[in-house]
Image: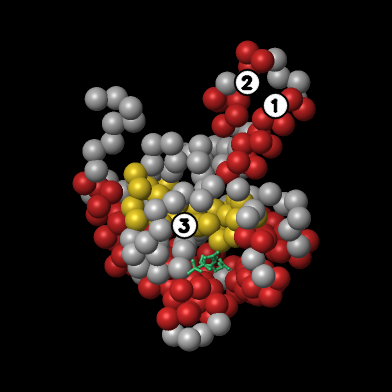
Amino acid sequence: MTVPTHVAIIMDGNGRWAAQRGWPRIKGHKAGVLAVERILEAAADAGVQHLSLYAFSTENWKRPALEVGALMALLRMYLRMFLHKLAKKGIRFHHLGSPEGMPSGILADMKTLEEATAKNTGMTFHLAVNYGSRLELAQAARRCVEESLRPDQVDEAALQARLWTAGVPDVDLLIRTSGEHRISNFLLWQSAYAELYMTDLLWPDFGPAELRAALEDYAQRERRFGGI
Ligand code: FPP
């Protein structure tokens, strides 16, 4: 079976999962973290080399302060608790997103995790936190100017090399849970030729069997990259 090299997931539906049970939204996010843990392991076992998970977008700051605070606290806890799990699986960690406006403690934790897992040779886990694709593209363009590139030097390769995903292969398979059919400013450049897989399942209900179904579906697709 052809396994996608890079899988990206828009993990949606935590709030609705909690609401269906009459619980506060944060309980949905907690269940979402458990799903992250299961999918990390399942993706690594399946032979995926890059897994990008959309945990917090640049637009998510607009959510109520209580929810933002709770999500940041969860993230902090997660980063500390799961270090040994990543190490055990040989997974490398990479923060995908802007450091600007991020709580310094979380940034420090993510840096520690990146450094501690830098020598691992298994799958790379890109956690998108404070990530927005348009912001990523704008900062890549700004860097071209700062580095005084001539107009004829500003091409696709120049921009690609200045994205936060520099050196990472394009997304092969983009999954979104919870029945929404949107890309929501996630990896727009990198997903130019990605195969899309949308499922009605809410993120906390998305497990290894569902990942397997998505990978099997992907393996049946015929990719032409604009050719015939
Ligand atoms: C979307 O569900 C989910 C998010 C905005 C956050 C995703 C976060 C996690 C899975 C947990 C945090 C992850 C880590 C690694 C700490 P939603 O709240 O938009 O759900 P709704 O659309 O049903 O309201």
Q: Is residue 149 visible?
A: yes
Percent x, y of residue 201? 35, 68
Kindly identify which numbered label has been placed on residue 10. 3
Q: Which residue is mark 2?
A: 154
Q: CA distance from mark 3 to mark 2?
A: 30 Å
Amino acid marked by disc 3: Ile
Question: Cβ–Cβ below 8 Å for labels 1 and 2?
Answer: yes
Q: Label 3's element? A: strand
Question: Which residue occupies 45% across, 68% down?
Answer: 13
Foreground pick, 61 / 146: 61
Report the coloring of the rendering: secondary structure
Q: Eyeballing the image, is 183 above or below 105? A: above
Quarter location, residue 164: top right
Upstream in the sequence, badge 1 or badge 2?
1
Q: Label 2's element? A: loop
**Does 34 sit left or right of 5 as displayed?**
right
Question: Cβ–Cβ below 8 Å for labels 3 and 1?
Answer: no
